[in-house]
Every structure is written in C-alpha cells, then in structure tokens.
Amino acid sequence: MENISFDKVKIKKSMWYDLQKINGEKTINSVRNRFAETGRFDAFKCDWKEGMDKKPHFFWDSDVAKWIEGVAYIVTGNRNDELEKYVDDLVDLVEKNQHKNGYFNIFYTVCDPGKEWTQRKNHELYCAGHLIEAAIAYKKATKKDKLLKCMIKYADYIYKVFVEEKSASFVTCGHEEIELALVRLFYETNNKKYLDLAQFFIDMRGNNDKDFNADVSYEERAYDQSHLPVRKQFTAEGHAVRGCYLYSAMADLAKINSDKELFDACKSIFNNITEKRMYVTGGIGSSRIKEAFTIDYDLPNQYAYSESCAAISLAMFANRMLKLENNRIYSDIIEKIIYNAGISGISLSGNKFFYENPLSFGRKLNRQEEKFLETYGRKLPIRERVEVFECSCCPPNINRFFASIGDYICSQSDDTIFIHQFINSEINLDDNTILTIETDYPKNGSIKITYNGSKKISVRLPSWCENHKTSKKYTLENGYMNFGNIQDVTMDFEMKPVLVRACSKVYDDSGKVAVMYGPVVFCAEAVDNGDNLGDVSILTDGNFEIEKDDFTNFYAITADGKRLEEQTELYSKYIDNARKCKIKLIPYYAFANRGDSEMQVWLNVR
Amino acid sequence: MENISFDKVKIKKSMWYDLQKINGEKTINSVRNRFAETGRFDAFKCDWKEGMDKKPHFFWDSDVAKWIEGVAYIVTGNRNDELEKYVDDLVDLVEKNQHKNGYFNIFYTVCDPGKEWTQRKNHELYCAGHLIEAAIAYKKATKKDKLLKCMIKYADYIYKVFVEEKSASFVTCGHEEIELALVRLFYETNNKKYLDLAQFFIDMRGNNDKDFNADVSYEERAYDQSHLPVRKQFTAEGHAVRGCYLYSAMADLAKINSDKELFDACKSIFNNITEKRMYVTGGIGSSRIKEAFTIDYDLPNQYAYSESCAAISLAMFANRMLKLENNRIYSDIIEKIIYNAGISGISLSGNKFFYENPLSFGRKLNRQEEKFLETYGRKLPIRERVEVFECSCCPPNINRFFASIGDYICSQSDDTIFIHQFINSEINLDDNTILTIETDYPKNGSIKITYNGSKKISVRLPSWCENHKTSKKYTLENGYMNFGNIQDVTMDFEMKPVLVRACSKVYDDSGKVAVMYGPVVFCAEAVDNGDNLGDVSILTDGNFEIEKDDFTNFYAITADGKRLEEQTELYSKYIDNARKCKIKLIPYYAFANRGDSEMQVWLNVR
C-alpha cells in the first residue's frame, strides 16, 4: 500500500479548495510577514550578537523550515517567484552558514557556540528534521536542490556524531521529528544510511542510560516518550506533538521493516489515543501543562489544550497507520481532524491563530481574574485568535498541512485504489489514469467516483454514517466498501444533525451531548444564543433546521432547546422556569470568529 | 449584642449531642494518640537535636494548642482527669521551656535557634495565637491558669518586639490567628494592650514595606491577605483559613471600636464569599494550590479543596458578623456549615479525617494515573478519610469546633435573646433564667422554645424554608421572627427534599441540581447507585421518598431518576436508552464512609 501524493491531486471547488486558496494566498504571506517582523528570517544570517534584540530562539529554524515546507507544497504545480525568492535567499544563508562539518543550527552558531549536542532539550535534531523535510519538499516542488544538498551533508554529520563517534551528550532528541524526517530522506535518496539513523534514534529512545540522570522519574521521562523502549509503549504519554511525530516514525519503520512488534505498539497507542484520550473534535493533548496527554478519559472542555499542531500530528500518524493497515479506524480520525480540530486553529480570515482549541469558553474573565487563576496554577485558553505567537509552531504547521491535504485523499496497492477522504478532486495516477471524486462533501454526502483505470476501487464508509445508498454492490472490509473493478459509482451518505454522547467515564461530558453533521462538530456561541450557555439545554427529541450560512460558507443548525431563566443567586431553589428556545449552532472550526463569546460544544440535555 | 457562651448551653439528645459525644469520647483521644505517635507532644520537651527523628515542624505548637483548646471545651462542666493530666504535663513543659524573655516556640527553640522573628512564613505568631486561645479556654474550663500566665508573658514580649522595639524582620505574620487570639486575651484580661496589639497587626497588614520585597506581586501578597490594607479589601483572596481568621479578628475589632470602615470591609468580604465563592455545602477555598479562594464562581466539584478548617473558619467569621449585625445572612451560613462542610471532614466512626471536602468523586484512579496527573499539576482529593495527616490542622480544629458548638446557638442584647441555631438544648442565662429549645432538628422542623425570663425572643427563620407555622405572631426583621415577650412559642418549618440550582455563572454546576432537606445537603454514592453516576439524571418533577437510615442516624432520600445505559465507546450516537431508576441519596456529611465510591452532590437533571 502506498500513498498517492498531493501533487497528483487537483482539488476542485469545495471547502478544502477554499481553505487551500486562503492558505496559499493569504496565510503563507501573513506568516511570512510575522516571521520577518520577529527576526526569524534575519536569524538565518547568523550575525546576531549578545546585546542585540531579537535573539534567536532554539526552535526558530523549525518555524521557518515548516514555512518553507508550506511554500513548497503551495508552489507545487503553481510556481510563485515571490515566495520562492524568499526561500532561495534563506537557502543561500543556510549554505553560507552551514559549518564545514555539515552542522547547521542558528542558536548554537550565534547564541551558544561550542555547546552543540550538549543540551538534549534544545531541539537541535528537531530543527534538523524540519529542515530536512523542507529541503525534500522544496526540491520536489521546484527541482532546486541546494537546501537538500546542505541537509544531506548535515544528516551525514548527524550519523557520524550519533552513530559512529557517539560524541553527543545525549542519544535521542528531547523533541522527536528527526526520525520521520530521516525516513523521508531515505525515501528521497534511497540511501539506507538515513533509514538506519532513524532506526537508531527509534531504538535508543527510552533505551539508554545517557539521556537522563538516574533520578528522573518515569513520569518525567514520559514527557518525551522516553519512559520505556518504544516497543514497550502501549499508551500515548507526554507531549502530544512529540508523541505523534515519534509514533509517525515508528509506523514508517514498522512498514518498511515489516516490524510486527513496532506495529503492535503503534496500533495500541493509536487505539489508546482515539478510544480514550481524544476530544470529539479530534483534538489531543488535554493538558496545557506540558502540552500533554494525561490519563484515560481526562478531557476537560474549558481547560482543553488540544494544540493545533497536535491535531495535525495525529493526522500524520493516522495516515501512516492507514498505509500499514487499510482500516477506517484511521481514515475516520483523519476526517474528524480535517473538519474540526485540524482547521479550528486558524481564523476564517486566514491570518490569525489559536494554539489551544478548547471545547468551551465560560464567562469572560478580566485580567485580574486571569492573573489570580495563574497564581493557582491554572490558565484558560485565549479567546481570540492572534497573528503571532512567541512559540509559533502552529501557524507554519497549518501552512504545510493545508497545502498538502491532498496526501490524505487516496492510497493504492498493486490492485486497488482506496478512497479515504471525500474531497472534490481529480487524481492523476502514475499509470496515466484518472480518478475523479465529485462531491460537495461535507455539505452533503453525495459522491460520484469515476475512474478510467483497471484497479479495483475501495471506498471508506464513514463510521458516523447510519444510512447510505450506493449505485453498485460492494463487500465491506474494515469499514471500506470494495466495489471491485468499476468505472464509476455514486453513493449517498445520509447526512443530518446527530446528537453524540461521550463514554460514561468522561467526567466532563456527562449529561451532555454534542451535535454533529456528518464529520463536522458543531458548537453554540453566545453571540448567537446569549450568555450563560450553561442555562441552555438541547431537547434530545427536538427537531433540527439547517440553513446555509454565508459567514462560514457552510451551514448553521438550529436545534430545539430550553433555557432556564438566568439565576444570579449563588444557590436557590430549583424552579423549572425553562422556556423553549432555539439553539443556533455553527461549525466548531468557525468558533471565535465574531469576537469574544461564550462557546460550548457539549450541551446539557433535556 | 453579646454571645451566649457554650458553657451556658446544655445540648440534649440530637445530632449535635451525638457529634459532641463521639468527639469527647473518641475523637479527642484518637487525635491525642496520633499526636503522641508523631512526636507532637514530646516536642514540647524541647530536647530534639539534629539527627533525631520526629523533627518538630514549625506548626506543631498550633496543632497541640488546638487540641488543648478542644480538651478545654470538652471538660467544661464535665471534668476529665486523664485528659487534663495530659494537658497539665504539656503546660509544665511550656513553662519550663519558655524563654526568660517570654518567647515560646518549639521550632525556633530546637531546630533554628537564634532565628526567632526572621521568617515571616514560619507561623510563629500563628502558633502563639493558638496557644493563647488554648490558655484562655483551659483556664475558663479548669481554673488552672499556668498556661495563661505563660501566654500573657509571651504576649507582653510580642508587644515589646513588634510595637516597641520593632525588631522583628517582619511586621505581620504570614498566617493570621494572633489577631483574633489577642482580642480574646483582651476580653479575658481586660488589658487594652492586647487589643492595641491586635489592632496593630490588623492595621499593618498590607500596609507596610517590611513584609515583602518590592518585587512580590499583588497576587502573591494576596495569599495571606496582604495585597491591600485590610480596610481596602472587599473580596476574599488567598488562603481561605488565613483569610477567615483575619476577617474574624477584623469583625471583632469593628465591633469593639464601632469601626464602620472595618465593618464595611468585613461585610463586603462576607458577601463576596457567600454570594460568589462558597460551595453549597458551606465549603470555601476551591483551589488545592495555595488552599485558596480563587475567583468568583470558580467552584469545581471534583477538584474542590474546601478544607475542613476553612469551613470552620467561615463559621467563626460568620458568628462574629452576627454579633455586629443580627441578620440571618450570617446564621444561615453557620447552619449550612454545621450540617455540611463543617462536619464532613470526620468519619462517622469519629477517628478518621478529610482535609479536602470535594463535592464529587469521579472514577477511581490507580496510583500511576494519580502520579501522571500530578506531573500535569493536578491532584484529586483523597477518597477515604485517614487517621492522621502530616499537616494536621483539621483534626484538632474539629475537636475544638465540635466541643464549642454551643457558642453558635444564641446571643443576646440588653432586651432580646436571639435564637440562631435549632439544637435541642437548655440554656442557662446569666440572670438565672432558662431558655429551652426542644427539637429534633434537622430531622424535622418542629421547634418548641420556652423561656422564663423577661427579654424578648427573636428566632431565625431559615432562608431555605418556604412554608412555616408559628404558635404566636411575630414581625420579621433581617430574617428573624421577633416574637416580643413570650414564655413559649412553637414553630414548624416545613422540611422536605428540595432541588437546588446554582447561579448561571457557576460553570461546573450548569445543568445540575443538588438535593437538600432543610439545611442538609445530600449526595449520591456509587455504593448505593452503581458506578458511572454521570449517566444518572434526577427528574425535576419526580417524587421523593424519605426513610430513616441507621447508618447515618438520619435519613436516606430516594429520588426518581433516569439512567442512561453505560457507554464504553468514546463517542457514539446519542440514543435515549435512559431507564427509570431510583436514586438513593445520603447526607453529604456522611459520604465516603463505606469504602471508595464515586460520589456526586450535583446531579444531572432531566
């Protein structure tokens, strides 16, 4: 089973067409401008000196690398001189400032020279990994291979330092990423050395005495998935993004090496995430402290962290698992992410971002209240997206994720084409055949697939779908409809608002339901429904109305509900003064686009 | 308006008779034994040396002092040679080890000699305050005044150090208590010097440059109520027990000096607590971190801290406010505390304690899960009461609070006796008249009051009471029924299970109700209702059955409810498979007495 790369996919008019358009025309430039302002590009000149402002942070290389990767995907088949000039200038600076031995890292070149490979927590290999990914993507998109050559030289040096000389102060990086990047470099170069290096980092994680002092606890080691050798890890622990980057590389290696033990660990971890530690939006990493997975069923809504990057990283992991085992458990989760937590981190205007993606906003706090809460170890997510973060991993991750969404649509084996996501598109296959997916999905569930080749066609039947029709017969396997050799097929997945409940063990969702329309999670905002959303209940036997909504370019759902009269006394006799009301719901991904407002995904029921 | 002291009150067969009996016969000895085992008594020998175990903690003096105060109240009118021998031996040690200048503190005598008055956070004046309270109580109970003489000498020395010489490194203690103790010492000795010293500490708090380095933030200063001069404080901030001890002293001074400004601050703070920052159980201090008040309406149930001592301290504050202004807003809160959060901290067996009094237990976590949660800055309350804590402020606080509950029943002015709490009792007034309160309250609301004196009678009409009858007419004033000059009156407050809701702004209680019977808050436990209490909803239009319950010696309430079928899938289509069920509820104060079990005060509604 192999991926069908985004560059084979032409996305046509659809929600994702619009998302890609704004990403390619607006977001990529907006992020560029913010990076320029904050000194992230100038940092590549490597002329910062003590006393100057805009001191390079040790993760800046990676921010810019992800942005370059985003540019690469955006200019694929649609070249753009202005953006490429920016990248080319940066690449020249990389070449100029790369150390003779191949090393490249801005922070250790200008801020802490001589300390290379001494601080495990300072993201050196993480930055290297993102630069490698950027180099591969940019070469594929433009044929310009200067950055890739630099990065190959760097990778060779890393191999020497870590495998041959073992001269670094640590064995594995505190932030995973290099592992999956090296696998990509192996695929790009066919040089097994990089695969070996990836394997080395994977095998050594949680499996050496050099990375931690003996007194570091199991739980502290779990922060970067080093509490156990990776093959002994069966639950998702620690920093969610680091975790899913690691798990992605583990899945890559499991596939390349047919490593059953590694696959079993990956599958167990994936199930642990998606069956016990994931928000209904596909968001993961519920704890702001350490940006981490916590424990099973611990999914607070108001204090949800659910970092934008974490949702993207789960899609990356799921996509790799899908190539190991074609099963809708993976592609269903990708769908959940690409219509919810994976796209809620960016404003509809395309230039403002959330780091956290909470499932509820309570009453608005004033600054003094926020400061007091911080004193007590708590911090609520910000309530309006901003143009730039100090730690700006999410915006360029959105750039590259959005631009490469085509990667998630189809895959193929020797004899079958698998269709995972229903995005209106034309896919030009390597054998000069064409597959088209015609649909307005997720606005509705009508899909027409046409194909002029000779492989069999297998299409995901989404797990949320209760009723569906197809124009041809099929056999179901792992949630996929195997249609055999066909030239076309139409299908209709019945889409309507559905109430969803959580597992009995999820404390924070008890007595509540969420509204979904197909894969899209909805939410109620005070801007539509008034404050005190906790006084509102949805009627489980009520009706729904759906109407087109210009603002979101999707639908608004109106549900029957009841609203208790506002009560200002702290405790008072309960009087059933609830009056019928209509609850207006909008797609979760569009929340917080109309100013500061209370919001809830999970609504009380009546 | 003056208090009618507990020593005038003979409590007869009732819930509080039982609570006092177990406190006097079992709890006081159990705490004594634990204190003996942990070295708290031996510490008074002041012979600890570096290298020995059981190193005295800087708050041990206060633990023992509160226990002595408890003994004093228990032996009042009911002398007990065994307990008194224990106290007398301790007092001999205090006398022996008191410094020549009057100073007494175990920690600074044996652990850190020469460092007296240098560490504001180390509770020296707090310990002094509790020893002063113990000394006054013990002298009143037994006429033995050795400890009081020692403490007067100590108080004189404190006056010298803080007021005359200003030689301490700080101006006010990091943990309030000395202030209210000095007021008591003033009442006991009639020496205005102690009142002046209390006033000094009150006036200086948040009002000097010595207590904090300039860089300590407003929020950090608020931890011990030092963010502003006390007269400028209008909200309850910081450590809840410290706060209410301070506010109690402020109320004392407001009364003694007719200090309107101080009264206004006290009233505003009291209202802020009871209208915005208090659990329905009367518990306060919602944050485990810093054991503190946080912000308005922030009342998490599962993570509630609600320290036992904090509820007691709020009763102390409320009782003082009641003497400033006879209004049921104060006595209603006392009632809430003495039937809920003020008594839930001790097991029905009388020998095990909770520090935290949460309003919900979710699913039971294993130790590994707990350790992970701690890594992410969170800690859930323990789920079974224990015999002893490292920091053991709560058990002896319960000793003294339970033994002196008579203090909260009545008060009097020149011409009126005010009846605040309905506890079956006989009150022997100073003018040789007798007031009797005959009732089974809170089992029912029937009360008969008889009085053979000439003052007027005024009786609280509880705010929870919707319907009531009285045998005589009255005029209502500030929630009190003024009956005028009467010899007897009967009244019946209708008591039945009532559903209570929280203010719309309390995020954690939205869509939920609590069940109360009179002043008693009820809860559901899994031991009666099965696990997954979040799947249970109470019918707002359902019926209630009440039956006697031998285990709690009170009632169990059975409510009509619905229970959704257990759902193990993380997210699934909501199906209304809820079946009718009966929800068994027990008094909140009796929770967690039958092993580890889920528990909820706030129940979902249907």
Image (cartoon, coloured by chain):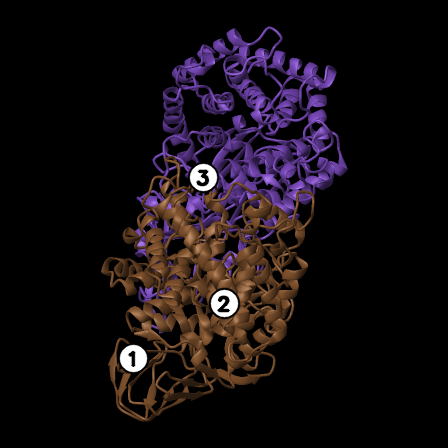
Chain colours: A brown, B purple
Q: In the structure shown, which secondary structural element does the residue marked by tag 2 occupy?
A: loop
Is A574 on the left-hand or right-hand side of A388? left
Q: Disc 3 is attached to a residue of which chain?
A: B
Question: Taking B176 as reference, is A207 above or below it?
Answer: below
* C-beta proximity under 8 Å, tags 3 and 2: no
Q: Find disc 2 in the rendering and name its residue.
A: A145
Label 3 – label 2 distance at C-alpha: 74 Å
Q: Position of residue B179 (x, y in %)?
A: 64, 26
Disc number placed over residue B343 in the picture, else none: 3
Q: Share a chain, discs 1 and 2? A: yes
Measuring from the top left, give residue B96's x and y in whole percent.
Answer: 51, 6
Amino acid beneath label 1 = Tyr
Q: Nearer the viewer, mark 1 or mark 2?
A: 2
| Dots 3 and 2 on the same chain | no
Looking at the rendered structure, whether the residues under marks 3 and 1 are on a common chain is answered as no
Dot 1 or dot 2: first in sequence order is 2
Up the image or down, B244 lies above or below B201; here it is below
Residue A38 image-quadrant placement? bottom right
Q: Is residue A84 above or below residue B492?
A: below
For label 1, the crowd category at 10 Å Cα-Cα, with few meaning under 14, some 14 to 19 and many 20 or more, is: many
Q: Is residue B109 left or right of residue B50?
A: right
Q: Give how far apart the Cα atoms at labels 1 and 2 are.
A: 39 Å
Q: Position of residue B242 (x, y in %)?
A: 59, 34
Per the model, the C-alpha gap separating discs 3 and 1 is: 59 Å
Residue at x 41% of width, y 49% of height: A224
- Name the residue carrying label 1: A480
Which three-letter amino acid code belongs to the residue tagged 3? Answer: Ile
